[in-house]
Image (cartoon, rainbow, N blue to C red):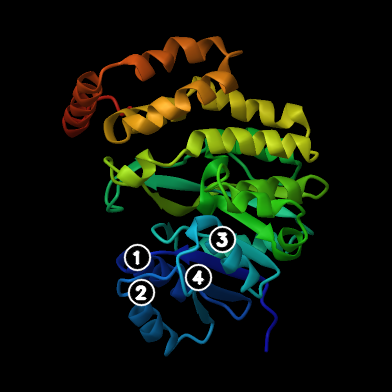
């Protein structure tokens, strides 16, 4: 039996349709060096039937079904633990690989002794029909000898995108402190923490060519609105610094988080769908960003803005997008 160099590890929950599209984009590219591992977080949709059908003619597909829903971070941990590849490419269940992705990444993995990698992608609408951006990170050439700071600088805020991360499995399993990510306030952050901690002393790579298509969540996503993603990321970076990642390497992440659109997008979601969460997080957010002047100019007004104004901004955004106007993707 050929030893696997790469596992495409897919944590999933109740997304059978999207999962089938993803796996269908992978199967034609499979080689003896690659396996697919699906970790099912106790889905109650057609996922088990789908996997049973797909595995009949594809022995390199592995399926692990958890007894109960253990939330996303523990499911990601399950996906890595149950993988057998030397490297694990974490992949969101609603994204899709480009037809050349596996051959490209195998060539990179076989070219050096890497600790971690980050992969560029294109960004699409929720149906993968309309391409919003050809690259989520504007990179012109691969970096095959990058340190952690280089990876963060190259990927910037998009470092948070799950499907962009490739990590050496033994380094993941040997990373001390990752269990701190399994409970709030670190929900949705484990892959970033392990990537940072795994790559501190090793050689990392950054792929400029988009190797997958990121499916954008539907605009009014209540679950996203109720998740404290932004604060989790900030506390994650603080934990990374405390555990050895040079502070200068994470400063760019803080700056991009404050000065670009993610914090704004997070507040807008909460004002629309979960105002109680916005109120609860307001003092915590102030505490994190008191030293950044742009925060007070761009984000605080959104915290204080009445809900009907937020709704009006959303309607205006939808209208201008339908008219083909300026694409400010909140």
Quick check: marks 2 and 1 in contact, CB under 8 Å? yes
Pointers 3 and 2 in contact (CB under 8 A)?
Answer: no
Q: Quadrant of residue 219?
A: top left
| Residue position marked by numbered label 2 in the rendering | 47
Q: Which mark is residue 14?
A: 1
Is 113 situated left or right of 223 in this image? Answer: right
Q: Residues within 10 Å of mark 4 (few under 14, many from 20)?
A: many
The answer to which of marks 4 and 3 sits earlier in the sequence is 4
- Badge 1 crowding class, 10 Å Cα cut-off, few under 14, some 14 to 19, many 20 or more, is some
State the residue position of label 4.
39
Residue at 44 percent across and 85 percent down: it is 55
Q: Calculate the distance from the C-alpha at mark 3 to the C-alpha at mark 2.
A: 19 Å
Closest to the camera, between mark 1 and mark 3, is 3
Helix, strand or loop for disc 4: strand
Where is 138 relative to 259, above or below?
below
The answer to whether the residue labelled 2 contacts the one labelled 4, judged by CB atoms less than 8 Å apart, is no
Determine the CA span between mark 1 and mark 3. Answer: 16 Å
Q: In terms of sequence position, does the residue under pointer 3 or pointer 2 come before the other?
A: 2
Tell me if residue 101 can be seen: yes
Locate residue 138, reporting x and y percent.
52, 35
C-alpha separation, residue under disc 4 versus residue under disc 3: 10 Å
Q: Residue at x 56, y 42 (%)?
A: 185
First in sequence: mark 2 vs mark 4: 4
Q: Residues within 10 Å of mark 3 (few under 14, many from 20)?
A: many
State left or right for residue 159 relative to residue 214.
right
Q: Which mark sits nearer the N-terminus, 1 or 4? A: 1
- Tell me the element at label 3: helix
Mark 1 falls on what kind of element?
A: loop
Q: Is residue 15 above or below residue 243?
A: below
Q: CA distance from mark 2 to mark 4?
A: 11 Å
Quadrant in which residue 262 is drawn: top left
Q: Return the residue at label 3.
A: 74
């Amino acid at each position: 039996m050929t030893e696997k160099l790469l596992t495409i590890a897919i944590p999933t929950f109740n997304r059978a349709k999207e999962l089938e599209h993803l796996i269908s984009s992978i199967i034609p590219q499979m080689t003896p060096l690659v396996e697919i591992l699906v970790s099912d977080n106790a889905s109650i949709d057609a996922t088990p039937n789908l996997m049973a059908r797909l595995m009949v003619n594809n022995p390199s597909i592995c399926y692990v079904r958890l007894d109960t829903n253990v939330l996303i971070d523990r499911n990601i941990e399950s996906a890595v633990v149950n993988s057998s590849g030397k490297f694990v490419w974490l992949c969101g269940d609603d994204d899709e690989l480009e037809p050349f992705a596996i051959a490209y990444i195998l060539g990179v993995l076989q070219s050096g002794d890497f600790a971690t990698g980050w992969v560029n992608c294109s960004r699409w609408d929720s149906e993968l029909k309309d391409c919003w951006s050809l690259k989520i990170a504007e990179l012109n050439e691969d970096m095959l000898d990058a340190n952690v700071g280089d990876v963060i600088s190259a990927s910037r805020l998009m470092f948070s995108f799950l499907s962009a991360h490739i990590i050496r499995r033994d380094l993941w399993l040997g990373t001390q402190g990752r269990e701190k990510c399994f409970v709030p306030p670190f929900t949705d952050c484990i892959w970033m923490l392990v990537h940072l901690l795994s790559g501190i002393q090793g050689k990392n790579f950054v792929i400029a060519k988009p190797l997958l298509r990121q499916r954008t969540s539907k605009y009014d996503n209540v679950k996203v609105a109720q998740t404290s993603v932004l604060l989790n990321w900030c506390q994650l970076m603080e934990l990374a610094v405390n555990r050895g990642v040079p502070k200068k390497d994470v400063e760019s992440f803080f700056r991009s988080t404050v000065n670009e659109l993610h914090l704004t997008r997070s507040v807008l979601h909460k004002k629309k769908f979960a105002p109680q969460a916005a109120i609860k997080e307001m003092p915590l957010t102030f505490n994190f960003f008191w030293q950044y002047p742009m925060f007070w100019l761009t984000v605080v007004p959104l915290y204080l803005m009445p809900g009907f104004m937020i709704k009006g901004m959303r309607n205006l955004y939808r209208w201008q997008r339908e008219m083909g106007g300026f694409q400010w993707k909140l």
